[in-house]
Amino acid sequence: MKSGLGFICGIAICLFCLSSLTKTSNSQLIVPATPVGLVMAFPGDKNKIPGDGKWLLCEGQSKKIADYQELFQVIGWTYGLGADSSGNRTTFQLPDYRGYFLRGVSGKNDEGKNDNRDPEVDKRRASDGTNASGGKSIGTIQDDSTRLPRYPNEFKTDKSGIHSHLDPTFSGYPGPHEVAVDGRGPAGIDYNSSASTNDSGEHFHKVVGGDKETRPKNVYVYWIIKAKP
């Protein structure tokens, strides 16, 4: 009975989804209207993006407010003033998402629960070109960073930190403890206790190898924004 009910519900959902689509005169399906300001990933070439001005690339372009009033009402000058940085302020700037992964805003939700998923939120900066501290503001940028390894025992250092110790060293004579020769002690004498070595002082070893950035697996897409209804 439960499986039959689930099947019926599935059909109902599909019919609802289909009913939300409209058809043109030549029976082509049209996706329901999307809100201005919506950002989407576009998997095709640049020249395949609709050229009617309703969708724009997120590449930091300057646009006239008069031409994109609805979009300006959504993002304002969050991403910069655009080409007109005078007192007139007739332009605004689109977000520049080239080379960026987008991250959900971290903080408290409507129920007051904090996710604490952005431990370095204080290092975010404004994306309007001022590099001012951005905090949790929408549109702020966070530069790349590398945390300590979760499993540090899996990391090894290089061998470039080679250093020397002075005593003891082998003199060519039998015995439990041989002292150094070449002007640093009499040869062929056995001692009952070992000679201590000189420490080489505090020093560091660097981890070698690695790449130019820390990143997950990814696929190239174009970020586009709905600019007009």
Image: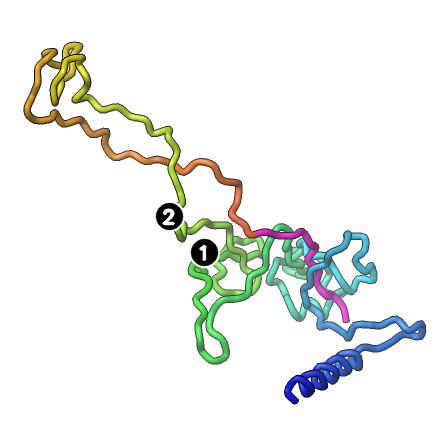
Q: Left or right: where does residue 132 sit relative to residue 57?
A: left
Q: Residue at x 67, y 51 (%)?
A: 220
Q: Left or right: where does residue 180 sit relative to residue 5?
A: left
Q: Which mark is residue 123?
A: 1
Within the magenta stretch, is there residue 215? Answer: no
Residue range in magenta is 217-229
Q: How was the colour assigned to the protein in this rendering?
A: rainbow
Type of amino acid under label 1: Lys
Give the class, few, some or many, for how many residues have Cα within 10 Å of label 1's Cα (few <14, many ≥20): some
Which image quarter: residue 196? Answer: top left
Q: Is residue 22 above or below residue 172?
A: below
Q: Which residue is mark 2?
A: 152
**Pointer 1 or 2: first along the chain:** 1
Q: Is residue 186 above or below residue 52?
A: above
Q: Residue at x 73, y 65 (%)?
A: 227
Q: Left or right: where does residue 106 sit relative to residue 186?
A: right
Q: Residue at x 55, y 61 (%)?
A: 103
Asked whether residue 6 is in view, the answer is yes
Q: Which mark is residue 111?
A: none
Please, which residue is most extreme toward the left here? 192
Which image quarter: residue 73? Answer: bottom right
Q: Quadrant of the N terminus?
A: bottom right
Type of amino acid under label 2: Pro
Q: Position of residue 11 (x, y in %)?
A: 74, 82
Of the two numbered discs 1 and 2 in the rendering, the one whose residue sits closer to the viewer: 2
Q: Is residue 157 above or below residue 194?
A: below
**Which element is circle 1 on?**
helix
Q: Position of residue 90 (x, y in %)?
A: 70, 61
Which image quarter: residue 156? Answer: top left
Within the magenta stretch, is there residue 228? Answer: yes
Q: Residue at x 70, y 63 (%)?
A: 225
